[in-house]
Amino acid sequence: MNTELRQLTSLDTQFLAIETDRNYGHTGALSVLDPSSAPGGRLTLETLKETLSERLHLVPPFTSRLAEVPFGLDWPYWVRDEHFDLGYHLREIALPAPGSLEQLTEQVGRIFSRRLDRSRPLWELYLIHGLEEGKIAMLSKTHHAAVDGMSGSEIMTALFDLTPEPRKVDPPPQPAPSGGVPKGLDLVAQGLTSLPRYPVNLATRLGRLLPHADLVTSAAGVPGSERISRVLSKARNLVNGNADGQVIERPVVKAPKGPYGGTVSPHRVFGVGSISLQEIKQVKNRYGVKVNDVVVSLVSGAVRDDLSRHGELPGEPLVVMVPISVRTEEELGTFGNKVSAMIVPLATHLDDPVERLMFNHEKLNLGKEQHDALPVDAMRDISTIVPPALHTRAARVATRISGSFTRPPWNVTVSNVPGPPVDLYCCGARLESMYPLSIISDGMGLNVTVISYRDSVDIGITADREQTPHVQDLVDGMSGELSKLLDRAP
């Protein structure tokens, strides 16, 4: 295999497959920087370009473009972009006075509502000047096919420093001789060698995987998946001579249609803010729960208030999808998606904030137990038993009908990404906050992602501008829910 080829997985490819002119596959971050600690108190595009040019080899996705395998015979590859132009990916704009947070998020929404150019490496970086108090914003866009939450954090580590003085980075190793970037016929040949593996893998792995079909994220919401799991669990016990063995029984989780569930428009809107990490830990310790339980509960309270205000709160609980990293220690420093998910009820049907917290704690614990029952390499199994062309078409159809003709698999995504507890610097400018920006799609129009940084938890809420123009109210609602839990704490 050509060493310049890195193949995408089925999950990586799914983020490409669902992309349309309304559904985007890129994630990002909006960072606010204080340039007063930078040389001369300034952060310029030229300085950023110089720093990045020295560190590009630390982030392979930044210099790799997509190479599709003709006829969908195999998953696409990342290949070296022979015409890479760093200047294309770095851009610079300024806000008009006074440079408020509202102006910033409006501008970010416009930039984010454009697809990345697939003929180039799938990322862009913007410096945004003119913020109040002389601050500078940095907006990143990177396709989810290239990074997940954990590998995105590793990109941050590669591009930021622990001191205002940028660290010295070793130059890239001398590249080994290669046959150059592969062409279409090379990839066809490579894809043809993969075709025989699908029937073999289907026969050897399907029996092991299907008893857990309802726990595989790709199958979430597929009618009958719970029954398939239960029946095949019984069958597996009989084949193994263990007729009295434990049958996989899991509560049915059905997302209500409606909330944040329409067909998304091409326009994105963002709510951003920060809450105290120390206060979240106080709630965790006083109620005997986990940090993630608290974060999910803050979202459940904010969403309940938001839907109640607009007369859209269903009587049944909403359903939340919580991504879980399955990246092993050996896979640290690699890119792409190594992620699974829990899909559990969200306590939007309960009026009391403490009851909401304990409900979410119970359901997340149960979801974790169910998730741990899934074979570790289940996501890899999916990618090896389903031919790429079929998997891609299925992903597109599922996205198109979600929330319109069927119930969505979930209503809200909540992701909690651990970040650094110490100050970071970019070209000498101190990072003040980093608001995550993420993906929404038809039927699943609300994404809440948080990242811890220093003594704060930075919140980024992604929504559809036409469905949820008041998204900043949800950030305020999370802060209000935290105050309620602190006031009621034992």
Image: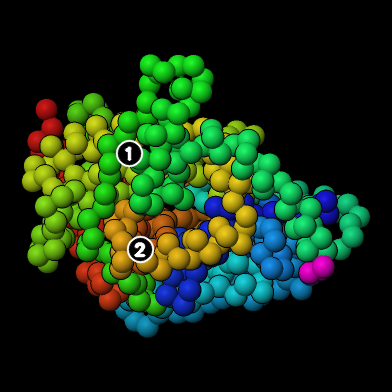
User: What is the secondary structure assignment of the residue under circle 2?
Assistant: loop
Dot 2 and dot 1 residues touching (CB under 8 Å): no
Precedes in sequence: disc 2 or disc 1:
1
- Where does the magenta region start and end? 181-185
Would residue 190 be found to the left or right of residue 415 on screen? right
Q: Nearer the viewer, residue 399 or 145?
A: 399
Would residue 169 be found to the left or right of residue 155 on screen? right
Q: Position of residue 292 (x, y in %)?
A: 32, 39
The answer to whether residue 368 is seen in the rendering is no
For the point 51% across and 23% down, which residue is it?
239
User: Residue 132 falls in which quadrant of the image?
Assistant: bottom left
For the point 13% across and 37% down, which residue is it?
354
Position of residue 150 relative to residue 184, above or below, is above
For the point 48% across and 74% down, which residue is it?
20
Residue farthest along the bottom direction in this orientation:
96
Q: Nearer the viewer, residue 286 or 268?
A: 268
Q: Nearer the viewer, residue 132 or 202?
A: 202
Position of residue 418 relative to residue 437, above or below, is above
The 10 Å Cα crowd at callout 2, few under 14, some 14 to 19, many 20 or more, is many
Quadrant of the snapshot with the C terminus? top left
The type of residue carrying mark 2 is: Ser
Q: Which residue is mark 2?
A: 402
